Image (cartoon, helix red, strand yellow):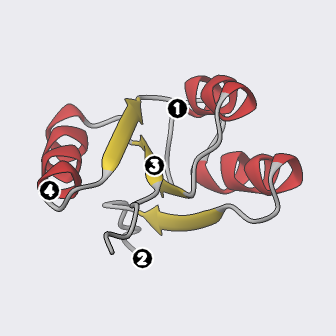
Amino acid sequence: MEVKKRKILLVEDETVVREALRDWLIEDGYVVECVESGEEALKRIKKEEFGVIVLDLKLPGIDGLQVFEEAKELEPETKGIIITAYFLYI
């Protein structure tokens, strides 16, 4: 019996990173939808159900944590993975 893989929403503003992650996930058999901003992500989340949301922490406008918090309010079963290339020099 084949297991149906969940749909993933990938939220990443860096084109190279977004395309690389998308290709990697699709190669593994996942259905992947991509958006570039937190605002776009929230619009998609309100229209469609995603099993997993992969979010960049630092996004223009609404950041990844805010998007995930709102997604959980809409669909408590949603899982999230926060990624970042952000580094703070101290």
Q: Can you identify the residue that label 3 sits on?
A: 7
Front residue of 47 and 42: 47
Q: Where residue 71 appears, x then y in whole percent?
A: 74, 48
Which residue occupies 34% across, 45% down? 31
Q: Earlier in the sequence, mark 1 or mark 4?
A: 4
The image shows residue 60, relative to residue 82, as above or below, that is: above
Residue on which disc 1 sits: 60
Whole-Å distance between the Cαs marked 3 and 4?
Answer: 14 Å
Q: Which of labels 3 and 2 is toward the front?
A: 3
Residue 14 percent across, percent down from the top left: 27, 37
The reply to whether discs 3 and 4 touch (Cβ–Cβ < 8 Å) is no
Mark 3 → mark 1, Cα distance in angstroms: 24 Å
Identified at 31% across, 69% down, the residue is: 2
Amino acid marked by disc 4: Trp
Q: Amino acid at mark 1?
A: Pro
The residue indicated by pointer 2 is 90
Neighbor class of circle 1 (other Cα within 10 Å; few <14, some 14-19, many 20+) is few
Q: Earlier in the sequence, mark 3 or mark 4?
A: 3
Q: Is residue 72 left or right of residue 57?
A: right
Residue 30 picture location, percent across and down: 30, 54
Q: Earlier in the sequence, mark 3 or mark 2?
A: 3
- Marked residue nearer the N-terminal end (3 or 1): 3
Residue highlighted by disc 4: 24
* Element assignment for label 1: loop
Q: Amino acid at mark 2?
A: Ile
Q: Of the residues shown, which amino acid type is indicated by label 3?
A: Lys
Quarter of the image where the N terminus is located: bottom left
